[in-house]
Image (spheres, grey):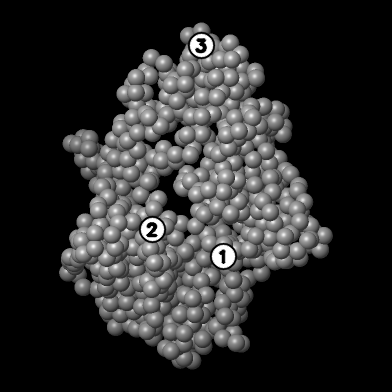
Amino acid sequence: MLKSVLTAFQLRSTMSIFVSQFNPLLGKNEWVLQDENYDYHQEIARSSYADMLHDTERNQKYFKALKKAIEQRRTMNEQVNVLDIGTGTGLLSMMAAKCGADSITACEAFTPMAECAKKVIKRNGFEDKIKLIPKRSTELTVGEGKDMLQKANILVTEVFDTELIGEGALSTYYHALQYLLEPNCSVVPHSARVYVQLAQCPLGKNWNEVQPITIDKTKSISVPKEMHNCSGALHLHDLQLNQLHQSKFQLITDPITVFCFDFSDKEKLVTDKNLNSAEPFNAKSLAHITANSSGTIDTLFMWWDLDMDKEGEILLSCAPYWAHPERKEVQWRDHWMQAIYYPSKYIAVEAGEEVSLTSCHDEYSWWFDVSTKKEPQVSISDVLPVCSCGIHLTYGRNRLGMLNDSVRNQVYVNELKKVINKDTVCLSIGDGSLIPLIAAKLGAKKVFAVETHKHNYQIIESFIKSNNAEGVITLLDKIPTKQQFDLMKVDIAIGEPSFNSCLLPWHNLHFWYILSELSSTLTCYPNKMKIFGMAMQFRDLSKIRSAVKTCEGFCLEEFDSMIEDSSLRVDRNIEAEVLWEYPGKALSEPLEIASFDLSSIFEENKVYNEHTLTFTRNGTCNGIAFWVEFQYGTTTISTGIINSEEKTSDGYVTWDKHTRQGVHLLNQPIDATSNGKFPVTLTYHPKSGQINIEF
């Protein structure tokens, strides 16, 4: 029946279709109406092209290196034939055309971007100079009547990510050198170096491994043995190291170059000339470095730089501020950041002690390990190691950081201590929470812990066994029915609350929805949730949505129109971002725009709140930040501003590092003057579980 309804709807309209979408507040899937090309537009809107085009340093150095390569070919009396792999908007091809290349072949496999590039190239008057092929470079053919009349003698491409090789740069270069380029060709960029620096970083450690939780002088929550010294997750931990203050880490060694890649020599890109072998690009290096200071190596910082030309005169570096070779204000970019890796075990070293660093990579990924004479390395895998304890495959880095947040945990301990005694029966609601163990350690008679996700269930089960709490804590793999709940004789419901499916801070109201199905009078912690908003002037974050207009003298309005059209179709009004990585000034005071009493059952009437943000600081408002605060008895836990009184004199705020905040980026920034106003309206539909914020 449903299939026939959908078919009938699609026959009547080619504009919209029903798709299944998860409702985080209700905790279930529901059918919603979406643009029939929703996935197509989402891929365009989520692309990082705009971020790259706002990277002035990148653009200028590509332009400079291309000009140099073309001039060098001219001095050799050669015709200049350029190949641009992954042309995107066509920017690099147009640079080559402006520098006087004789022929340019540009390939782009992403169909909407290829169509956009075609329009951009025509708009800038280069349609007769640039041949655009909507294919992958590995599909290009060379010869009379084929994609390329002849092999190119200059390659320009940007196929890098934070790991340098994560987008397949090694195989892309190898194939091009083998089949598409002349011998002794020029390659832009020419080469790359990868750096690692060993450090002690408590924050990084907290993102990698669950730490014991202190309850009091005699009690603590211990961590299962299998969760120590795990190799960690498959996924890269990339972040803006430039926003990590040096008080948050101790550098134990100098940076060291662990790998160099010459992109002009295919023989140096592979370790096994048989590309049909399992791992032709795998490589390993061993370096020895002296510790500059004593400490425990628990974190490895990684970044890379590019020599844009063969002579190494044009350098493009992704180094963090303390190690940047040009020692200037570091270019902000979100498409290339820095990365954190973790050793298989943490090693204490003394100043002057020699440390061995083993670095490995395959075609797409990196892994590292450290050792000393006192702590020799057992072995390091020749293939990318995977998580063996399960926690890294289940919890994200932010979630691990939240579990290790000593301030949060102390609030839970202090407030629950006031209401839990030897006769208390608790119900814990949330995903992957250690609150049930806190309640058990505080002496609760019984704790029922709801863990509906299989992997969360297994992890919490390990914690329960490790802490000998099987007699107190009962795990439930389903939310109890009303009848089952009544038989439990629960005194108090507890939670962080945190759910795997929640993106925006207020999605964790799912906690309230579950409680409302079970009881209308149950005492609960947290007992209140408030939503706050604040006008912001973000220093860089707005660039991911702002129009490019022109880039290095080339008009990119067609690109702007494509991104704007797709964003209007698929972008949420408010997106989730980890704001500590994106500095911004507060232009208003925090404003409470909604409050929810979690200790009472929600009413079914629609809530409509109109508010006005008043600017208290002059500046340019380009976004509104949102977060929630949970009330635990007399104490508040914020998922946004850590301490509103800690704003710097110029208005920069300190954000919680373990949760994502909500952000609305303005299409058109507005001039904020003191006492100016900005309207914000919140509408809450309890039955449908929809919270909408309009401006």
Q: State the separation of the CA atoms marked 3 and 1.
A: 56 Å
**Residue name at image x 35 percent, y 38 percent:** 548
> In the rendered image, is residue 416 in sight?
yes
Lower sequence index among marks 3 and 1 = 3
**Is 180 located above or below residue 290 in the figure?**
above
Which three-letter amino acid code belongs to the residue tagged 3?
Leu
Residue furthest out toward the right: 373
Q: Position of residue 132 (x, y in %)?
A: 42, 21
User: Which of the image's four quarters has the C terminus?
Assistant: bottom left
**Residue name at image x 63 percent, y 71 percent:** 224
Helix, strand or loop at mark 2: strand
**Is 7 located above or below residue 174 in the figure?**
below
Observer-nearest residue: 81 or 41? 81
- Residue beneath label 3, please? 149
Q: Position of residue 672 (x, y in %)?
A: 25, 57
Helix, strand or loop at mark 3: loop
Q: Which mark is residue 215?
A: none
- Residue beneath label 1, please? 248
Is there CB contact under 8 Å for labels 2 and 3? no
**Left or right of residue 244, residue 659 in this image:** left
Which three-letter amino acid code belongs to the residue tagged 1?
Lys
Figure label count:
3
Helix, strand or loop at mark 1: helix
Residue furthest out toward the bottom: 422
- Residue beneath label 2, please? 584
